[in-house]
Image: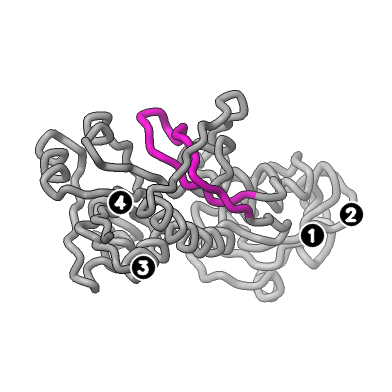
């Protein structure tokens, strides 16, 4: 039996999962993604990665600003068997979820019920979790609270950043979606309710969280740097210039938090210190700490805000 599928997704994370679906013998009727948005200094309009990928394959694309009655009726007329949602960025209305004979599933980047919400991978890294994973669940009106069909785990190392973890998780999601479709096709899908008592929430990253707090322990500072790479990035102020840290490592060293300890750009935290490996000066390209130090003198003993 060939399933008729609508796919809803937006970022690069969703692309391998859509690609995996397309490579089956099932039919992707239409792709929903966020409308084009202004990005970068030029403020030009840019399509989402899913939009560009779908356009190359001539898959019909829809970018509604909201799901009004006309949009719900449109989906109803398409008669999908399955709607697959992957980091779409919009909450689906209840009248859409209540369409008869349509199963709505979500590929979520955490081990639910932990880290429901917008930034599960970043929160897992910032929290220094040792593992995360992909959950396939049925969509219900309450955010990320639907019953779970399957999960698979991935280890989080101290060195991994958000971009690297996202790539690994996306590949895992691409594999699990094939297993999911197979179960649904064969009427063998068994959904298990989540434990509400164990639910935690991964709220969207706020700008106020991005500045480095030197009163945190070094491992926590490194975790924040990794979690916020590449965007929005974590930063500190050096003589009135914003410096974004791209990569750093924990060093066993002591000092007053925020103090530059040596000429290798080692900075003290409340416990141990971090050594900057790569950074980006405001308005400049990414460079190694060594390259930065060749053109910028830093004073050992200087205490940063």
Quarter that holds the N terminus: bottom left
Find the magenta span and give its range.
132-153
Q: Label 2 belongs to which residue?
A: 253
Query: Which of labels 3 and 1 is toward the front?
Result: 3
| Local secondary structure at mark 3 | helix
Q: Label 3 belongs to which residue?
A: 19
Q: Sequence order check: which comes first, mark 4 or mark 3?
A: 4
Q: Sequence order check: which comes first, mark 3 or mark 1?
A: 3
Give the quadrant of residue 194: top right
Instruction: Name the side, left or right, on which 12 lies relative to 278.
Output: left
Q: Sequence order check: which comes first, mark 1 or mark 4?
A: 4
State the CA–CA distance, disc 4 to disc 3.
Answer: 13 Å
Q: Label 4 belongs to which residue?
A: 8
Q: Position of residue 108 (x, y in %)?
A: 47, 47
Q: Does the magenta stretch include residue 119?
A: no
State the CA–CA distance, disc 2 to disc 3.
Answer: 47 Å
């Amino acid at each position: 039996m060939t399933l008729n599928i609508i796919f809803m997704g937006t970022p690069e994370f969703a692309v391998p999962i859509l690609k995996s679906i397309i490579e089956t013998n099932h039919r992707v009727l239409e792709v929903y993604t966020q409308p084009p948005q202004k990005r970068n200094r030029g403020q030009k309009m840019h399509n989402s990665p899913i939009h560009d990928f779908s356009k190359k394959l001539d898959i019909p694309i829809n970018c509604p600003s909201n799901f009004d009655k006309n949009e719900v009726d449109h989906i109803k007329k398409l008669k999908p068997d399955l709607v697959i949602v992957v980091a779409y960025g919009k909450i689906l209305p209840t009248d859409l979820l209540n369409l008869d004979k349509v199963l709505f599933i979500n590929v979520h980047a955490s081990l639910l019920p932990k880290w429901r919400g917008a930034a599960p991978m970043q929160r897992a890294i910032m929290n220094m979790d040792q593992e995360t994973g992909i959950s396939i669940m049925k969509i219900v009106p309450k955010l990320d609270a639907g019953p779970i069909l399957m999960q698979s785990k991935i280890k989080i190392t101290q060195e991994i950043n958000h971009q690297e973890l996202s790539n690994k998780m996306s590949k895992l999601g691409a594999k699990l979606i094939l297993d999911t479709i197979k179960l649904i096709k064969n009427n063998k899908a068994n959904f298990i309710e989540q434990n509400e008592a164990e639910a935690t929430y991964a709220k969207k990253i706020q700008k106020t969280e991005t500045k480095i707090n030197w009163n945190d322990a070094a491992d926590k500072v490194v975790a924040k740097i990794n979690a916020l790479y590449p965007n929005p990035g974590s930063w500190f102020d050096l003589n009135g210039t914003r410096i974004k840290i791209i990569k750093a490592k924990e060093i066993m060293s002591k000092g007053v938090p925020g103090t530059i300890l040596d000429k290798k750009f080692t900075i003290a935290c409340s416990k141990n210190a971090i050594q900057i490996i790569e950074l980006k000066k405001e308005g400049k390209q990414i460079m190694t700490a060594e390259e930065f130090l060749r053109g910028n003198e830093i004073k050992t003993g200087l205490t940063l805000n």
